[in-house]
Image: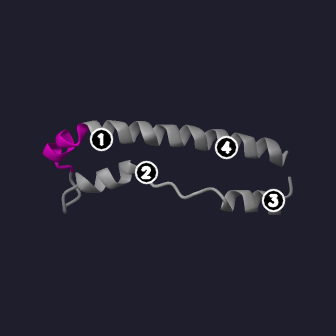
Amino acid sequence: MKSDDLIRALKGVPETRLRLIDLAWEITREDGSIDFEKATFYGKEIEEAINEAEGYAQATREAVLCLRRIAH
């Protein structure tokens, strides 16, 4: 695969917004500490967001391996 083709393919990958980032902002106080009451309240959503982020990380690792194979 040519580098131009690879770049074109990567540009077609949609942006991913992980819910974990938004939830982290939601449970963080102004001083940067965690509001544990809010964290408890959002517990189920946080767990789901962690699973989502782990799945995204695994898919990213697989994509990197594929790209390395193509490059060699």
Residue interval drawn in magenta: 34-43
- What secondary structure is marked by label 1? helix
Specify the color scheme.
one colour
Mark 2 vs 1, N-terminal side: 2
Q: Position of residue 33 (x, y in %)?
A: 21, 53
Residue highlighted by disc 2: 18
The disc labelled 3 sits on which kind of residue? Asp
Whether 57 is drawn above or below 22: the answer is above
Q: Residues within 10 Å of mark 2 (few under 14, many from 20)?
A: few
Dot 4, how many residues are within 10 Å of its Cα: few (below 14), some (14-19), or many (20+)? few
Q: Are marks 4 and 1 in contact (CB under 8 Å)?
A: no
Q: Earlier in the sequence, mark 2 or mark 3?
A: 3
Tell me which residue sits at (24%, 38%) in the image.
43
| Mark in front: 4 vs 1 | 1
Callout 4 amino acid: Ala
Crowd around label 3: few <14 · some 14–19 · many ≥20 (10 Å): few
x 74%, y 41%: residue = 66
Residue visible at 30% across and 51% down? 23
Residue 70 relative to residue 41: left or right: right
- Image check: 30 left or right of 59? left
- Cα–Cα gap, marks 2 and 3: 27 Å
Determine crowd level at label 1: few under 14, some 14-19, many 20+ residues with C-alpha closer than 10 A: some
Label 1 amino acid? Glu
Q: Which residue is mark 1?
A: 45
CB under 8 Å between discs 2 and 3? no
Residue 68: x, y in percent? Answer: 76, 44
Q: Which residue is mark 4?
A: 63
The secondary element bearing badge 4 is classed as helix
How many numbered discs? Answer: 4
Whichever of labels 3 and 1 marks the residue nearer the N terminus, that label is 3
Q: Residue at x 22, y 51 (%)?
A: 27
Which mark sits nearer the N-terminus, 4 or 2?
Answer: 2
